[in-house]
Amino acid sequence: MVRAEVFITLKPVVNDPAGLTIRSGLHALGFASVSEVRSGKYLVLTLDEADPEKARREVDAMARQLLANEVIEDYRINIVSLPLAGGRDSSLPPVGRAGEGVMTTPTSPSPLRGGLGRGS
Amino acid sequence: MNTGIVVFPGTWSDRDCAHALGDVLGQPVRFVDYRETDLDGLDLIVLPGGFSYGDYLRCGAIARFTPVMGAVTAFAERGGLVLGICNGFQILQEARLLPGALLRNDSCEFRCEWVHLRVEQSHSAFTLDCRPGQVLKIPISHGEGNFFADPATLDQLERNGRVVFRYCEPDARISADANPNGSLNNIAGIANAHGNVVGMMPHPERACETLLGGDDGLAIFRSAVHALAQGRVAAG
């Protein structure tokens, strides 16, 4: 099993009114240091595939065909191998629990650390 | 003019289009289910407005892969008339039948209001009855109508006369104030190279009776009837 995280962001040349609105909200709350906010989408795919490289190629094809629109968006794929286990493995990163670093696990260096990228 | 109006899950303007073309213009109309692939006998395909597949992922991204869209693509390539309105325009771009993309409105608001459109060219199948510079009053109703294309594509659209409609003031002036969504160059509608496929964000089907505020939208549907009658386009 492989988990694929797909990060979809607007290309740098594309205006992001949602990001601008979020930025002005942060400024209104006093977070004056925020100079830019870019919004995007985060998709988590679980694949019945043992080979991470094969999974990456497959998810890349999915991203090109459907998940991202190359006219306006870039995407980046992060592949996380999941241990074979019956039932839910406690080592899996929690998904979507508020207040936790969802994407920081020993097997998965934070994909956000490098900023919002420009494709894989 | 035999018109097929495509209905996707989440389409909402199909009946308005049928009313405008069928009841007001007296043309034969039938609804085309998104699972259909046989468009024989149809002259015009309308992709109406709405929220196909809930606008999930991106507007039009899922609808683009439905069975009917394969048939619509072949129909368009044969020269059949295709009009994409609002969500239909977004689907045509996702299907690469028209270039560019429609981003979220720069205001981040859903805009539902009457706008003025300047007709930029009268050689597309949907503007034959118009004259360049003519102003049409037609409503918009969208949250993602902010036209975007990369500079090379935009330049090509402009130089080849493929910009069909621009948001304008009532006196035809192009201004930032008249732009309801941040569209590049105030673009509200474009055509493909042959002029048989047009996508537009405003809703001409909602402007076909004076009782409803205006009938400027009729010019767009009548143009299609005349384009067919003149044999300017191949029938499907």
Image: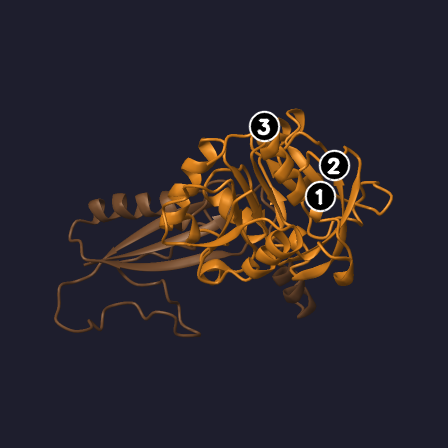
Instruction: For chain B, give the colour.
Output: orange
Q: Residue at x 69, y 68 (%)?
A: A28
Pointer 2 and pointer 1 on the same chain: yes
Q: Mark 2 vs mark 1: which is more N-terminal?
A: 2
Label 2 environment density (alpha carbons within 10 Å; few <14, some 14–19, many ≥20): many
Q: Quadrant of the N terminus of chain A?
A: bottom left
**Screen quadrant of the C terminus of chain A:** top left
Vertical order, B218 against A2 (above or below): above
Mark 1 = which residue?
Answer: B219
Task: State the CA–CA distance, disc 2 to disc 1.
Answer: 7 Å
Give the amino acid type for the residue marked by disc 3 in the picture. Answer: Arg
- Residue indicated by mark 2: B130
Q: Position of residue B35 (x, y in %)?
A: 36, 54
SS of the residue at dot 2?
Answer: loop
Q: Residues within 10 Å of mark 1 (few under 14, many from 20)?
A: some
Residue B224 falls in image quadrant: top right
* Contact, mark 2 vs mark 1 (Cβ under 8 Å): yes
Q: Is residue A119 visible?
A: no
| Rendered image quadrant of residue A47 | bottom left
Q: Are marks 3 and 2 in contact (CB under 8 Å)?
A: no
Q: Which colour is chain A painted?
A: brown
**Mark closer to the chain start, 3 or 2:** 2
Separation of residues labelled 3 and 1 (CA atoms)? 17 Å
Residue carrying label 3: B232
Name the side, left or right, on which A41 lies relative to A15.
left
- Where disc 3 sits, the SS reads loop
- Judging from the image, mark 1 belongs to the subunit labelled B
Number of numbered markers: 3
Q: Residue furthest top?
A: B159
Neighbor class of circle 3 (other Cα within 10 Å; few <14, some 14-19, many 20+) is: some
SS state under label 1: helix
Are discs 3 and 1 located on one and the same chain? Answer: yes
